[in-house]
Amino acid sequence: MAATPSPSNAPLSGRHRVAVIGGGSAGISVAARLRRAGVTDVSVIEPSDTHWYQPLWTLVGGGQASLRDTHRPEASVMPDGVRWIRRRALAVDPEARTVTLSGDDELTYETLVLAPGLQLDWGGVPGLAEAVGHNGVSSDYAPEYAPRTWELIRRMHSGTAVFTHPATPIKCGGAPQKIAYLAADHWRRRKVLDAIRIILVIPDPAMFRAPAWSQVLEKVAARYGIEVRLNSEMTAVDGDAREITVDDHGNGTKETIGYDLLHAVPPQSAPDWVKSSPLADPAGPHGFAAADRHTLRHPSYENVFALGDVANLPTSKTGAAVRKQAPVAVGNLLDVMNGRSPSHRYDGYTSCPLVTARDRMLLAEFDYDLKPAPSLPLLDPFKERRTMWLFKRYGLPPVYWHGMLTGRL
Ligand code: FAD
């Protein structure tokens, strides 16, 4: 891998063999694997000079990791021999096979990998965009706020703390409740838990999509005395009054809840330019990109693949899912480049490290059928373990930086 590649200043004219939009978890994993397979002329379109390891943001919010541990220069993860185009993709025309870029440029591709992640819609809940970062409101979903979550948790000794999960697909479906457990365990250790009312607002009829873990999480929430509002959604925030509105879709009621601490996860959707492109899945309500659930190829454009958070796949959007999707996308892309039909299949594998205490974790691994798919079949996957927590905090980051992003794992 290159020491520090810099963005390419070469003209963009000419046809690019493979263009990858997004240099996040999915884009870099794919680019690294393509280079390992000997593919030349791979371009990564990525405007940011910083690469983030987002799974640690939950532990930043919980006071167990520093924001410093969660990012590296984008140049340090860009695979050797890849052309880094430091621009933003603004539009794709899959008929003409072009990508419009910021800076008034256009690029032509033979094959396209769509991996720009998703968009946080802070404006999707009235009052949230104005309140986040002030008024006792924070969110682990953005690096500028995650350290503030810990400040709010640390300073709280009594009152009401509300943790919300929006009614859209989100990255890491467990993250809205993991931070509630980290906070509750901190307050328990400080012996103030009895003075704090904790409310967890969840849009679904159960605590977790995979039923087997839902039952375990019900017990975890009960252990901390957390009030769980199922079928419910935060629909407004009044930061000045420190109040939120919660709609209970189960019984059709609306409630105003006063809070001292609010951890809000914003609604999420595909980036606007993906939503308005022919690559968006017309069957999905949030504009995510269409992709065959097994081959990851676009159903209408055979030279386009989508993976990661942007893809409309019926599984949980996680880095762990990306780790399994990247080899499939690359294998099938090579098939298509060589005139073969896609032969690699993704089974929907995803995993969610459910941190349930400051030193305990459950690893929920499942596939499209929501059936447990444990990587370590001899371990009971429904048991909270300290070793799992240690693995998330200290084992997974090096696996990510040195294994996944280099295309080795
Ligand atoms: P990203 O990694 O977000 O990368 C997208 C990239 O595209 C970015 O570099 C961005 O700059 C770039 N981009 C955006 N727009 C454009 C554009 N127009 N043109 C070009 N480039 C663009 N996953 C787990 O596996 N385990 C966990 O415990 C876990 N916890 C999480 C906790 C939190 C709080 C969060 C926020 C996420 C968590 N995740 C977890 C999810 C995981 O981080 C994502 O699923 C993963 O990063 C998705 O990879 P991606 O490449 O699709 O998107």
Image: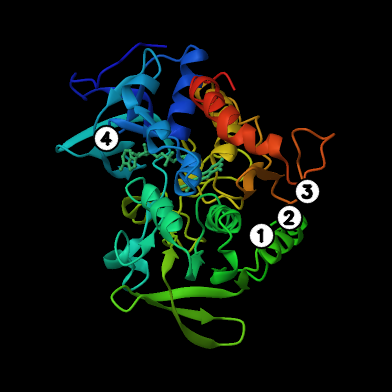
The x and y percentages for residue 359 are 64, 42
**What residue sits right under mark 1 in the picture?**
208
Which one is earlier in the sequence, the residue at label 1 or at label 4?
A: 4
Which one is earlier in the sequence, the residue at label 3 or at label 2?
A: 2
The alpha-carbon separation of the residues under discs 4 and 2 comes to 38 Å
At label 3, counting other C-alpha atoms closer than 10 Å, the crowd grade (few under 14, some 14-19, many 20 or more) is: some
The alpha-carbon separation of the residues under discs 3 and 1 comes to 13 Å
Question: Which amino acid does the dot numbered 4 rest on?
Answer: Pro
The alpha-carbon separation of the residues under discs 1 and 4 comes to 34 Å
- Please state which of residues 19 and 220 is positioned toward the viewer in this rendering: 220
Question: Which amino acid does the dot numbered 2 rest on?
Answer: Trp
Look at the numbered discs 3 and 2 and tell me whether their residues touch, using CB distance below 8 Å.
yes
Residue 15 located left or right of residue 191:
left
- Please state which of residues 381 and 394 is positioned toward the viewer in this rendering: 394
On the question of residue 269 being in view, the answer is: no
Residue 382 shows which numbered tag? 3
Residue 386 located left or right of residue 172:
right
**What residue sits right under mark 4 in the picture?**
47
Residue 375 shows which numbered tag? none
Look at the numbered discs 1 and 2 and tell me whether their residues touch, using CB distance below 8 Å.
yes
Residue 385 located left or right of residue 320:
right
At label 1, counting other C-alpha atoms closer than 10 Å, the crowd grade (few under 14, some 14-19, many 20 or more) is: some
Question: Is the residue 110 above or below the residue 364 in the image?
Answer: above
The x and y percentages for residue 365 are 70, 43
The alpha-carbon separation of the residues under discs 3 and 2 comes to 7 Å
